[in-house]
Image (cartoon, grey):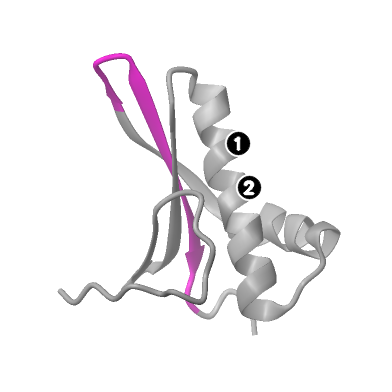
Amino acid sequence: MTCRLREDWRLTTPRANTPAGWMTLGFHEDLDEATMIALEAMLDLMCELHGFTRPEALALASLSVDLRITQIVNGVRGVHAVLPHGAIR
C-alpha cells in the first residue's frame, strides 16, 4: 500500500482512494453525527473531483454513495461513505 499526502486538498476528515472506490470517514460519539460527518466529507470530495455544485453532489450521492458502519467501540462511532469507482462518469 502506498500513502501519499495531498497538499493541494484541505482535509477535514480522513479520505482514501481504495480499490472499491473513494472513501470518507466520520467519527463521533453519536452515530447520526458520525454519518453526517462522513457524508459531508464525501460531498466535499465529489465537488473537488468532479466540479459539482453542492446540490448536484447531494443528488448524485443519494444514488451512488453507500454508508457503512466502521466501528462502535469505546464510545466512538465510525461511519464510512463509499463512492464506487465508475459510479460517476
Picture quarter with the C terminus: bottom right
Observer-nearest of 35 and 89 = 35
Image location of residue 6, percent across then percent down:
41, 75
- Tell me where the magenta segment starts and ends, as one range: 72-85
Image location of residue 59, percent across then percent down:
79, 58
Image location of residue 30, percent across then percent down:
49, 18
The circle drawn on residue 3 is: none
The circle drawn on residue 36 is: 1
Tell me the SS state at disc 2: helix
Tell me the SS state at disc 1: helix
| Category of crowding for the residue at label 1, using alpha-carbon neighbours closer than 10 angstroms: few (below 14), some (14–19), many (at least 20) | some
State if disc 1 and disc 2 touch (CB < 8 Å). yes
On whether residue 79 falls in the magenta region, the answer is yes
Image location of residue 11, percent across then percent down:
49, 58
The circle drawn on residue 40 is: 2
From this viewpoint, is residue 81 visible?
A: yes
